[in-house]
Image: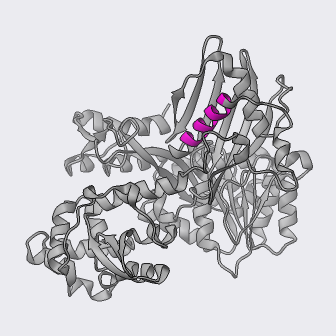
């Protein structure tokens, strides 16, 4: 809300905030703090109070109804199937969290939880060409309905999708005729419909990977959701070859070759305005071909730095090093730990008309307008190293390297970082100090490593506890101390939560958040690197400088009630 973001907020509370204070719902100090926090997050006061569980949504809606003189509408009485957009675009609905309900004449009635946010009504008025009128609703019910409507819009299948051949959904490669995908006749309608259902179901559930696995007496299909594999289907084992053949046809692989691994790619249209890339890998096993598909949903992967899970200090360090004109920012962690998403959150900050950004990736997972993105193709001779050499001849400001895998790539990246370019890259190591010794073990001279590096971030993805069903876990003081919590944290009233499970989550968890070790390279650390110190010595120096390791960063998220102790054990400990 614009009035909540002004410098005078601390002195003069107005509107709904003043009403909440006058009604005794909030103290003036709490109201001021809530207004400032909401403004900092670029969030409405209503959204902040409800989502942080400071106030009940129904009570807050009653106060807003009294303040703004608007009747309160119960969304539970509405049939979601009857809703339409009335000419309002999905991005506007998503941005302002306002939902068109119905139209009478030239007036459009719009559900809002914060009537003070006039920008939403003005934008919808401009978009629809209709006069708008606010309908006050409870924030939590509006959020639930919006999520349902937007999810349905994203995954709404094409007409007759269940009865059509799935090859109609596979977009042809540039220059290839659409019917080339059917060069091998796999005219098996039940298999086509079955795979169709599995793929759309996996994308709808937010799976990052699908595993098709044949065994002697059974066949299973698993989805990786929030980092955990879950068995979702068990088709008859006799279908193994037909399922594999269909998937290989879609990926344009050789269905006659079953003795060696193959890699391919599928571009899948899941709706009329959204497509998803699937990276396909086959591997011959004892009882048939195992097929793994990685979901590369470029439209869903782009987050802002605020959404990643940094502490305020970690975010400041990351943003400070992104603003440097040269040097290397290195992000490390295992496969699937969110390194690419973190890199692209940084690129989003850097992506300005005056900056030339080039990326080399294998493959490009997130598409960003204004960034020159290159898919590495080793078979064609386009390697990370060759792409980097080309970039350096094209006047780059920022270079992103999907992964430093070998000495040649590492040397070019380090030299680029030392010659006036900002280099963002990933590396596969367990923590930040080990990244330094990994580069030296590759063969990069220690003095070049010390000169090039500005910042190293190690990261993991921890599953978020479900807000609806998480429960406090009673642990003895000695156990908490042994886990790594301090006496001060325990004495301050530490509450550890654990997963329970309900119909709104996956076994007590819903979504994931980043756990980070953010290690800037200080002068003392550069001296250690130059003298080829071990990762243990570098880690000790980082500890002396107050840099939290991954375990400590995870414990902070446990203390905040975001995740569980068992989840931190899973991602950070043996």
Residue 7, quarter of the rendered image? bottom left
Q: Position of residue 10 (x, y in %)?
A: 23, 83
Residue furthest out toward the top = 217
Quadrant, the N terminus: bottom left
Q: Position of residue 218 (x, y in %)?
A: 60, 15
**Residue at 26%, 62% in the rendered image:** 50
Q: Is residue 561 visible?
A: yes
Horizontal arrangement in the rendering, residue 293 relative to residue 510 (left or right): right
**Residue at 76%, 28% in the rendered image:** 245
Q: Is residue 547 visible?
A: no
Q: In this picture, is 21 found above or below 535? A: below
Q: In this picture, is 370 found above or below 57? A: below
Q: In this picture, is 74 found above or below 462? A: below
Residue 135, quarter of the rendered image? bottom left
Q: Nearer the viewer, residue 498 or 167?
A: 167
Q: Position of residue 72 (x, y in %)?
A: 20, 69
Q: Nearer the viewer, residue 65 or 161?
A: 161
Judged by its main secondary structure, the magenta piece is: helix
**Residue at 65%, 78% in the rendered image:** 352
- Report the colour scheme: one colour
Residue furthest out toward the front = 105
Q: Nearer the viewer, residue 274 or 294?
A: 274
**Residue at 44%, 81% in the rendered image:** 123
Q: Confirm whether the magenta stretch covers residue 540.
A: no
Q: Which residues are magenta?
A: 190-202
Q: Position of residue 184 (x, y in %)?
A: 84, 33
Q: In this picture, is 559 found above or below 309? A: above
Q: Confirm whether the magenta stretch covers residue 194.
A: yes
Q: Nearer the viewer, residue 213 or 239?
A: 239
Residue furthest out toward the right = 381
């Amino acid at each position: 809300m614009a009035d909540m973001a002004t410098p005078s907020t601390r002195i003069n509370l107005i509107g709904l905030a003043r009403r909440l204070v006058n009604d005794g719902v909030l103290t003036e100090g709490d109201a001021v703090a809530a207004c400032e926090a909401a403004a900092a997050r670029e969030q409405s006061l209503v959204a902040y109070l409800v989502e942080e569980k400071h106030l009940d949504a129904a009570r807050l809606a009653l106060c807003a109804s009294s303040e703004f003189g608007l009747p309160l509408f119960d969304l539970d009485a509405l049939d979601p199937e009857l809703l339409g957009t009335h000419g309002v675009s999905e991005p506007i609905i998503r941005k302002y969290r306002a939902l068109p309900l119905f139209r009478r004449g030239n007036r459009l009635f719009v559900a809002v939880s914060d009537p003070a946010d006039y920008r939403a009504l003005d934008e919808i008025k401009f978009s629809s060409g209709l006069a708008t009128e606010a309908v006050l609703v409870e924030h939590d019910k509006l959020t639930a309905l919006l999520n349902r409507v937007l999810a349905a819009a994203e995954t709404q299948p094409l007409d007759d999708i269940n009865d059509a051949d799935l090859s109609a959904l596979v977009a042809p490669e540039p220059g290839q005729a659409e019917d080339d995908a059917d060069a091998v006749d796999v005219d098996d309608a039940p298999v086509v419909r079955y795979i169709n259902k599995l793929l759309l179901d996996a994308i709808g559930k937010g799976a990052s990977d699908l595993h098709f696995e044949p065994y002697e007496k059974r066949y299973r299909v698993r989805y990786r959701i929030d980092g955990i594999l879950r068995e979702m289907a068990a088709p008859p084992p006799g279908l193994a070859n037909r399922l594999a053949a269909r998937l290989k046809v879609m990926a344009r692989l050789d269905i006659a070759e079953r003795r060696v691994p193959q890699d391919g790619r599928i571009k899948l249209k899941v709706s009329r305005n959204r497509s998803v890339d699937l990276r396909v890998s086959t591997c011959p096993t004892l009882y048939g071909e195992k097929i793994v598909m990685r979901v590369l949903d470029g439209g869903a992967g782009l987050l802002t730095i605020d959404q990643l899970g940094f502490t305020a200090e970690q975010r400041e360090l990351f943003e400070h090093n992104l603003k440097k004109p040269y040097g290397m920012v290195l992000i490390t962690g295992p496969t699937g730990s969110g390194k690419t998403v973190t890199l692209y959150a940084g690129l989003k900050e850097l992506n300005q008309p005056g900056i030339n950004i080039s990326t080399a990736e294998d493959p490009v997972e997130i598409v960003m307008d204004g960034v020159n993105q290159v898919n590495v193709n080793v078979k064609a001779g386009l390697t990370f190293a060759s792409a980097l050499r080309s970039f350096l001849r094209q006047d780059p400001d920022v270079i992103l390297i999907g992964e430093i895998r070998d000495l040649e790539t590492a040397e070019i990246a380090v030299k680029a970082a030392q010659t006036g370019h900002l280099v963002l890259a990933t590396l596969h190591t367990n923590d930040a100090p080990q990244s330094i010794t990994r580069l030296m073990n590759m063969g990069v001279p220690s003095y070049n490593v010390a000169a090039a590096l500005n910042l190293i971030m190690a990261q993991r993805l921890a599953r978020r506890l479900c807000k609806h069903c998480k429960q406090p876990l009673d642990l003895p003081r000695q156990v908490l101390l042994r886990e790594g919590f301090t006496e001060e944290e325990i004495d301050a009233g530490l509450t550890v939560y654990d997963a329970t499970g309900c119909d709104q989550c996956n076994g007590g968890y819903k979504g994931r958040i980043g756990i980070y070790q953010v290690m800037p390279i200080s002068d003392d650390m550069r001296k250690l690197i130059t003298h080829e110190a071990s990762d243990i010595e570098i880690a000790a120096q980082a500890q002396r400088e107050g840099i939290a390791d991954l375990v400590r960063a995870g414990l902070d998220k446990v203390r905040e009630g975001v995740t569980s102790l068992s989840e931190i054990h899973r991602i950070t400990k043996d």
